[in-house]
Amino acid sequence: IAQAEAAINVPYTGIIREVEVPLQKSHSKNYMDRFQNKKLTLEAGRLGFGVMRRETGPALALLLGITGFVLLIACANIENLLLARAANRSREISIRLSVGASRGQLVRQLLTESMLLALLGGIGGIIVARWTLYGIVSMLPPEGGEIYFTETTDWRVLLFTLCVSLFTGLLFGIFPALYSTKPDLANTLKDQAGQVSGGTSATRFRAILVTAQIGLSLVLLISAGLFLKSLVNIARVDLGIRTDNLIVFGISPELNGYTPQRSLALAEKLEGSLAALPGVNGVAGSMLQLVAGNNWGTNVSVEGFLSGPDTDTHAMLNEIGPNFFSTLGVSLLAGREFTAADNLAGPKVAIINEAFARKFNLGTGTAPLGKRMQRGAGGKNDIEIVGVVKDATYSSVKEPVPAQHYTPFRQNKEFGTINFYVRTALPPEQIIPLVRRAVANEDSQLPVESLKTMDAQVKENVFGDRMITLYASAFAVLATLLAAVGLYGVLAYSVARRTREFGIRLALGADAALVRNMVLKEVSAMVGIGTLVGIPVAMALAKYFQNQLYKMEGADPVVVALAAAALAIVALFAGYVPALRATRIDPMNALRYE
């Protein structure tokens, strides 16, 4: 790739400097320096070239990382269970070793057991994965989603799952297998099975695993909280339009062989047919569908605005029909809306938004009215500004409102496609079938495109944010439950191993509160250390996916505090049951405990 890039830039540089540079005029020296030094860059093509991968790659990588965290927490639970099981089987293993079994045979047996568990877990995971895939596909936009996602499972993904399952079984089964096959035979055979503590090192290791689970769970809880707050911020965005009871759909007559004149005549007839539907109190058309990720813009020249060589004169464009702003609920600040008379026979007119007026220094109120403009440069300003509207969302919910200008679609000589907006006083689901019928009455062979409510269109526009938040939250809750189960298991096992100790303490006069606090002290230590480790990791992770968060700078302290508090409550609840059980030990039974 490096050699190809170097080779292709030799002729490219010559073309730029000998052919293109002489054609560039009215640009500053800085611009020309950048222009002359442009280079072609090559990338590996094994994954193709697509916008979808660039846009969703970071989000999907993040979800994969979150999944890995949950896998680690689950594996830590299995490790703890295997250690506890090995401690209970220490007498059995010692007998096997004493009668001639080799350590290698026992390690292979124990690893076979752990890998069998992992394999069965992987098979169960594939079943859950199918349900998850159905859930993802159900959230996809109705049109286009099937291009990028599928419900089928690739064999390479299944192979990857199999390898991960076997690897985790090996990785988290090796320590319990090695530990349990190296006991002190004499002492183990003398001890009674119930008195085997499992060893100080194993107990400490189990506590470390639970602490790691708590830390990882906190990382996931904080991450989910950040995405949830980001989604709340998105939901609070003032779109500048009223989306309730608003239906949108498109038609493309030119794809059915219509001429521009026939396409315009059809659009005008549909305006009347849709307006006559029961419950409809507003119909308008536009060339560009709003909040759909579409962009259409051009450089403009505006009367009274002096532009330099590197001045940004770009403005977004939409061609619209009469009553567009009133139908969408966009406030008209000055001037008028377009009418049916704004056609090819009439003078060229335009309506601008507030951002356009600010960008080109046109003033406020009625000051921009009457000013003239043109698309491009070098001609005459032949378009009169007749209205100013409030800023409204253009392409994306999350993007700032750009400078926009609107022109009548009736003044477009190449008219061939249009989107309609239908405002209704009735529930949209009652009007949607009537909309389809109205189009079919004009041309039964003309497809209705992207028929939906505007609320659904807005949700589709932030689909990625909704998906990440949903699955990050689900994984965070799952991780917290797994950590709670792991904590409960370790403490319950610890209480069972310390039954005789607690019985002696109670027999010597210790009250129940003291014994309970001893157990809860272990919980507090593990939660405290897990929190101290988890918060910095979560902060670092927040910086990594900062660009996925909307109107947030790093980790929000409120989210961090709430996540830590929620995890502490769950952990203390999980630890309280074993602690309560410890206080109910009968001293006489405990002293006879085996």
Image (cartoon, rainbow, N blue to C red):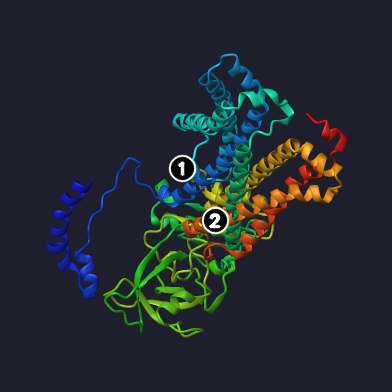
Query: What percent of the width, then of the height, locates residue 127?
Result: 59, 31
Task: Specify the quadrant that holds the N terminus.
Answer: top left
Numbered label attached to residue 418: none
Name which residue lies at 68% across and 60% down: 425
Mark 2 vs 1: CB contact within 8 A: no
Badge 2 crowding class, 10 Å Cα cut-off, few under 14, some 14 to 19, many 20 or more, is: many
Badge 1 crowding class, 10 Å Cα cut-off, few under 14, some 14 to 19, many 20 or more, is: few
Comparing 541 with 258, the one in front is 541
Image height of 425 relative to 302, above or below:
above
Camera-near label (2 vs 1) is 2
Image height of 113 relative to 22, above or below:
above
| CA distance separating discs 2 and 1 | 30 Å
Name which residue lies at 38% across and 80% down: 372
Task: Specify the quadrant that holds the C terminus.
Answer: top right
Kind of residue at badge 2:
Ala
Q: Is 45 displayed left or right of 566 in the figure?
A: left
Image height of 509 relative to 15, above or below:
above
User: Which residue bears the numbered disc 1?
Assistant: 148
Query: What percent of the width, then of the height, locates residue 383?
Result: 38, 75
Query: What percent of the width, then of the height, locates residue 553?
Result: 52, 65
User: Which residue bears the numbered disc 2?
Assistant: 538
